[in-house]
Image: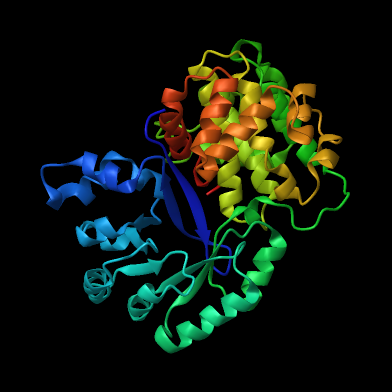
Amino acid sequence: MQSSITRHPIFDENTELYAYELLFQDNLDNIIKETDESSSSVIAESFFSSTGVDKLTEGKRAYLTFTEKLILDRIPLMCPLESVIVGIAPEIKDTKNVLEICKELHKKEYTIALNSFAFQKELIPLLPYVRIVRVNFEQDSIEKIKQIMELLEKNAPDAVLFAEKVNTQYEHKQAQDIGFKFFQGGFFRKPETIEKKEISTNLLNLVDIMKEISKTANDVNFDKVEALINHDMGISYKLLRYINSAYYKRATEISSIKQALLMLGTDEIRRFVSVIMMSSMSADKPTELLKTACIRARFCELLAKDNERKDAQALYTLGMFSLIDAILDQSMQDIMTQLPLATNLIDALANREGEMSAFLILLESYEDGNWDGVEDSAGSLSLNDENIPVLYMEACDWANPDDVIG
């Protein structure tokens, strides 16, 4: 598989997206070296453009971890100030020279983050120049974290704590109460309080629309889709507003649902309906949750199309519904009893059974930067894994819910 990049969202204390950490299949040293070996002065600039970092971060900062070698080569100073957070790997030996470069970065107002801090003596001199200190919330005890906070009060009073490996909503609340300001982990993809509750009629109507447009293009009954949309004033209004937006620069406006459907085509209708459906359920959730569902849907669909599978539309639905438990704060099993989805989709989503469940494992492995898991899943599905990184980037570029609901 060619070199892969994935992104991990970093949230602030209001659960708003602060930055994306980028994880690479290959060592960042090698990737930057391969970008332009002949001229170090353009390495960082060409790295940002050639690897698609700007597309992946969508205007947010890129949190990049720099090894001692990259720091000593002064690579962070070549990166755009406003685009990068300089994460320092904890394996530092040449503290003296690294410290001098950190002083220069600090003077130029770069945001410096110290990764995996655990009282390493060699890292303590760097603390006055660091704005973010990152600790492993899964691994470090509360007592140890409080000791780190005491150390920061003496050596880096302006630094804030960043909790990684925050895997549940309970841990997120716990980290907030302690005083962390930034958070990363799977907590935002987990239900907060699992309750047994009925799904609204409006949602069921949207699911019916999505079921129809998830058929192959030749089998979609546009008259049925039109009738379903016409029964929902909210979605009718949003569809016409969407089609008449600047996104579709047109000489004349569209005035009917049928016109809008025919112009959009099945792929864009499916995107529109699925985003509207999920956004109506996730108003009190991080936008990143909805965006991740959109990326998963498109990623699965592109994987199927790239490998000439016939179930691309079903796999789109699989990806979109893979986070519905976190959106509705219910168990996946309860949700699947209320939605009229195909049996193979229910088996995959609720029970992790059947071939489709391997796609869930693949996309989760890719999101986590588990490259061995990606290759194993791709192998079990007989997928062409060479194109996986490109398809993921395309899915990220496509899956922006703001285009639909903004």
Count of marks, rendered view: 0
Residue placed most toward the observer, 391 or 137: 137
Left/right of residue 388 with respect to residue 258 in the rendered view: left
Coordinates of residue 19 in the picture (x, y in percent) = 44, 58
Quarter placement of the N terminus = top left
Quarter where residue 26 is shown:
top left
Query: Furthest-top residue in view?
Result: 218
Residue at 83%, 39% in the rendered image: 333
> Is any atom of residue 287 visible in this view?
yes
Left/right of residue 307 with respect to residue 290 in the rendered view: left
> Is any atom of residue 268 visible in this view?
no
Query: Furthest-bottom residue in view?
Result: 154
Residue at 79%, 33% in the rendered image: 351
Residue placed most toward the observer, 337 or 180: 180
Coordinates of residue 177 in the picture (x, y in percent) = 65, 76
Residue at 25%, 56% in the rendered image: 69
Establish if 294 lies above or below 67.
above
Coordinates of residue 118 in the picture (x, y in percent) = 49, 71
Coordinates of residue 47 in the picture (x, y in percent) = 26, 45
